[in-house]
Amino acid sequence: MAIKEKIIESLQILGIIKEPIEENLNQPIESARFVVLDTETTGFDYVNDRILCIGAIVLQNGIINLQDAFEHYMDQEHFDKSSVQIHGIIRSDVLDHKTELQVLQLFLDYLGDSIIIAHHTKFDITMINNALERNGLPKLSNKTLDTAVLYKKTLIKSNLLVRKDHYTLDDLADKFDISKKDRHTAIGDAYITAIAFLKILKKLRENKVALLYQLFR
């Protein structure tokens, strides 16, 4: 048995690691391919609202690959004037748009088996899974990370500090001094989330977080 496996086994016996580590997560964080994503939608109703745009960026080896960014707009079958005030997407603005099925197929090819990162991941994944189900496609099985949750792990535990229950993407942008120029666009929010993730990783490394499985605990 290799030294690394012996150390892991010992930690499991001591109860420091309570669950077996998946082999594909027992590797350096830098080696993984992450896809950082964001969706712009007509609203926040999982059943009645629809995705307007999916934006995503690949992050690997600590590098954000803007040359391989993903940004596709969907046909708008459902339209909510009130949400336009937030994302600014209106029918006449988008010339290059595709059907929901076309965008989903392109996104699945782009995503592959990468680890998904998003801010408040549950919303984006649920919206995408509902769209996949509508189009007869299987739901996502990729592992996911939420920058809102990871950020909390970087905070000092102290009775003197007030911690929020929920941290917005604006909170993280302000904390890490990230430009909000393209805020509330799918690709812009994906980019902010990607930078925030790298900033969070830097802080987590101070606590000896270096392997993928440690991000999921």
Image (cartoon, rainbow, N blue to C red):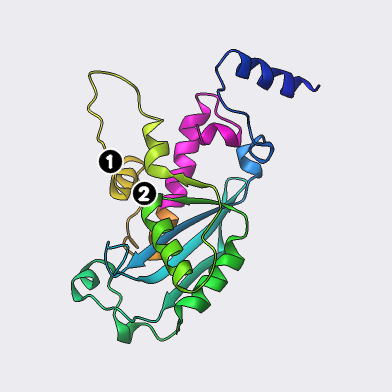
Q: Pointers 1 and 2 in contact (CB under 8 A)? A: yes
Q: Give the percent coordinates (x, y) of residue 79.
A: 26, 78
**Which residue extends farthest top?**
14
On the question of residue 119 being in view, the answer is no
Q: Residue at x 66, y 22 (%)?
A: 8
Q: Give the percent coordinates (x, y) of residue 205.
A: 53, 29
Magenta span main SS: helix
Residue 214 got which mark? none
Q: Secondary structure at mark 2?
A: loop
| Most foreground residue, 133 or 57 | 133
Quarter of image, res 151: top left
Residue topped by disc 2: 120
On the question of residue 175 being in view, the answer is yes
Q: Secondary structure at mark 1?
A: loop
Q: Residue at x 44, y 72 (%)?
A: 134
Q: Amino acid at mark 1?
A: His
| Most foreground residue, 142 or 92 | 142
Q: Residue at x 27, y 73 (%)?
A: 88
Horizontal arrangement in the rendering, residue 153 relative to residue 112 (left or right)? left
The image quadrant where one finds the N terminus is top right
Quarter of image, res 18: top right
Residue 43 drawn above or below residue 152: below
Q: Which residues are magenta?
A: 193-217
Q: How many marks?
A: 2
Mark 1 or mark 2: whose residue is earlier in sequence:
2
Residue topped by disc 1: 166
